[in-house]
Image: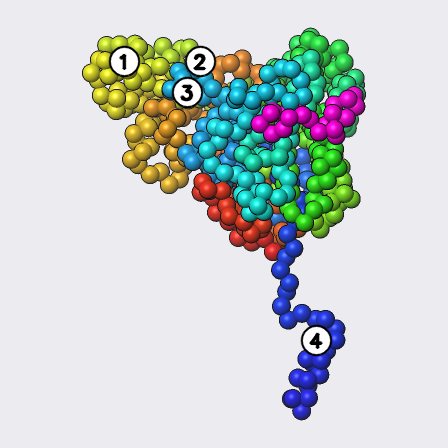
Amino acid sequence: MKKSLLSILFAFILTTGCKLKEEPQKKPTLVIGIVVDQMRYDYLTRFANKYGNGGFKRILRDGFSLENAHNNYTPTTTAVGHASIYTGSTPSSHGIIGNSWYDKILKESVYCVDDNTYYTIGNKGKSGQKSPHRLVTTTLTDQLHLAQNMNGKTIGISIKDRSAILPAGHTGNAAYWFDGGSEGKWISSSFYMNKLPNWVQEFNASGKVDDYLNVPWKTLHNISSYTESIADDNNFEQLFKGEKKPTFPHDIPNLRMKNGNYDIIKAIPSGNSLTTDFVKAAIIGEQLGQSEYTDFLAVSFSSTDYIGHHFGVASKEVEDAYLRLDKDLADLFIFLDTNVGEKNYTLFLTADHAAVHVPSYLQSLKIPAEYLNPKDFKLFVNTITKKYFNSDKLVENISNFQIFLNKEKIESLQLNLNVVAQKIADEVVNYKSIYKAVTARTLQTTTFNEGILNSLQNGYNQKISGDIFLVINPSTLNSNYTKKGTGHSTGYNYDTHIPVIFYGNGIKSGTSKKRFNITDIAPTISNLLKIEPSNGTTGKIIEGVIK
């Protein structure tokens, strides 16, 4: 009897096609990395009731969300964020220690992607003299190319050059960014190509940019419904040149010429809409997701950063920007469903960093917040070196909350570099806005496993970083912000807590409240794609995300 039942069961399996073992998950034909510049995690929850069902809510509902993900390094800036996301490592490994930084060899400030060995593709200006040459490790996108014997396409797109170039890695087929001013065109670098593809030329000739700039910036919904934000007319927001008040509507057609002409689109939600339009054109023009290989499209929405800097975290402009971005994302997802196939793509959405509330706004609420005066601070440091070493020429540069010492001068005075650095670190904490200070020597010889000093250590690169690292007080910006608008760069939660959402082919539905790092994204996607992680990866695979 038992033998008969087994025979029947076996026959049933053979005839109905039931599988004793699940087939391997098919790889996506397109991976999309979405970075929203300066997006705090709480923008997901703060504006939740006003988002539609097809944007943020769609990927939250059907994807996997990390609710406690953070940048695990300083400085929390755009270039460092994009490099860390795509390399799975921190500045200590990948070598991008800021948007710009002081070069100890050249004795001058350098920009993260500047490279005058290449020329602009798209116009005769210098905005395309760029490459990823300062990024010293491979990226997720490089590794995908290597794994596929250089097959498949990798393209980076962003209004900001650094946000397109660094994610595309060293082997990118293309990176495109927006050249504003009098140009108003998407451009690239001769690092990638000799001329713009026809589809880019057609997009640039389409007049889409002017279409966006010919209408005022009004709120998407009735402004009275924007109850998650402070009053529209307040003292904590910057003005567009030509405005008397920082209030809606913003008359973009009449403001554009006083605000850099085409540059103004960067600082309004239309910059994100323009980016979305260009992304869709790239998918069609490059036939992404249509081959047997996996393509990678790295997209960064930059206008949210410009708007945040200009108006601040609590502004109605920021709220409107995210409600409009939600619509752009919903539109993009439907486009992907139609043109790539809903089951053929995988994406992640995250941010390069978050941002602090405008310090002057916090001060109005009696919450501790400050502004640091760089000139006053430099004088204070010089008084320390004068007092203890009888010289005010020992400091070569102060930038990015790092102090670079003049090693030649220190040697000529027969002083010990480590002694000088430690004395400055010990004394500089007496300055009102400095909370902690630590020397490079300490970061080389001591391991900090958690907290803000761990973030500081992850941001330290022995080859190119300074000699003393500074931690400012919470909710402090330098006085360049003139008490209006906001910024970021610290290791405090307001700068580090960012969204991380995985969605699509091979991704489970769920959430996690465990702490994860931004550097965990790349190794997780690498694991999904069954490829080697970046050669500098320090992040870990996030268990539970992948089917």
Compared across the picture, whether 45 is left or right of 487 comes to right
Question: Amino acid under label 2?
Answer: Asn
Disc on the earlier residue, 4 or 3:
4
Residue placed most toward the observer, 337 or 166:
166
Question: Amino acid under label 4?
Answer: Ile
Residue placed most toward the observer, 417 or 350:
417
Which residue corresponds to the image point at 71% horizontal and 9% vertical from the top-left? 257
Which residue position is annotated with label 2? Answer: 373
Which residue position is annotated with label 1? Answer: 409
Which residue corresponds to the image point at 22% horizontal and 13% vertical from the top-left? 413
Q: Look at the numbered disc 4 and give the secondary structure of its residue.
A: helix
> Residue 363 location, x and y as percent?
52, 20
**Stretch of the chain drawn in magenta:** 187-207
Question: Amino acid under label 1?
Answer: Lys
Residue placed most toward the observer, 265 or 527:
527
Residue 287 appears in the figure: yes
Near mark 1 (Cα within 10 A), the count class, few <14, some 14-19 or many ≥20, is some
